[in-house]
Image (cartoon, grey):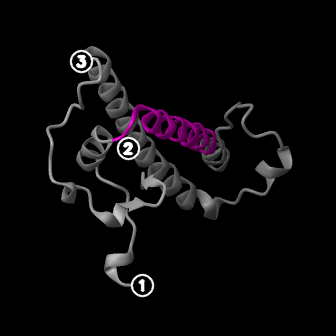
Amino acid sequence: MSAGGIRRPIQIEEFKTAIGDMPSDELARIRNELGNSIRHLERSNARLEKYIAKIEGRPKNSPEVDSGDELESIEEGDLQLYQESLRENQTVLNNYNERIEALDQENLYRSSHKGNGSTVPPTPKTNVTTANRGAEGIYL
């Protein structure tokens, strides 16, 4: 695959620019999608934290992991993988939360200005690269 065909998450400033041009129903759809992704990542992180705690010998009581058998199959060699996954998930969560905040700010601006525009000044459409915009909108 060529470098031009690689999709990367849109940077926060590009995201803010892109949402300024979107209708409110699209903003709501994106916010719901982000919220769903956040819930899944938080659940995943709770599991990872429980696995890490078990490997480190400090069991963590959490309803997130139902099966004792699942915890029994955790091996010490998995510790680094779980820790790296937890860090990566936290980075993604931070990015998603930034986007939620940007959406909230855009909605606040629109409601305070009675829909007269967005928080961003008009800019050429080239600010958001086409590599980050798919047929369904922006790539989060």
Label 2: how many Cα within 10 Å (few below 14, some 14–19, many 20+): some
Q: Position of residue 88 (x, y in %)?
A: 45, 53
**In the picture shown, does residue 50 fall above or below 24?**
below
Q: Position of residue 118 (x, y in %)?
A: 24, 32
Q: Which mark is residue 137?
A: none
Q: Position of residue 30 (x, y in %)?
A: 47, 40
Can you tell which of label 3 and label 1 is closer to the viewer?
Answer: 3
Q: Nearer the viewer, residue 80 or 58?
A: 80
Q: Split into 4 quadrants, where in the image is the N terminus?
A: bottom left
* Residue at figure coordinates x 70%, y 31% from the top left: 62
The residue to which callout 1 is attached is: 1
Q: Residue 33 in magenta?
A: yes
Q: Position of residue 123 (x, y in %)?
A: 14, 48
**SS at mark 3?**
loop
- Number of numbered markers: 3
> How far is mark 3 from mark 1, CA to CA?
44 Å
Which stretch appears magenta? 22-45
Can you tell which of label 3 and label 2 is closer to the viewer?
Answer: 3
> Which of disc 2 and disc 3 is earlier in sequence?
2
Label 3: how many Cα within 10 Å (few below 14, some 14–19, many 20+): few
> How far is mark 3 from mark 2, CA to CA?
27 Å
**SS at mark 1?**
loop
The residue to which callout 2 is attached is: 95
Asked if disc 1 and disc 2 are in contact, CB closer than 8 Å, the reply is no
The residue to which callout 3 is attached is: 113
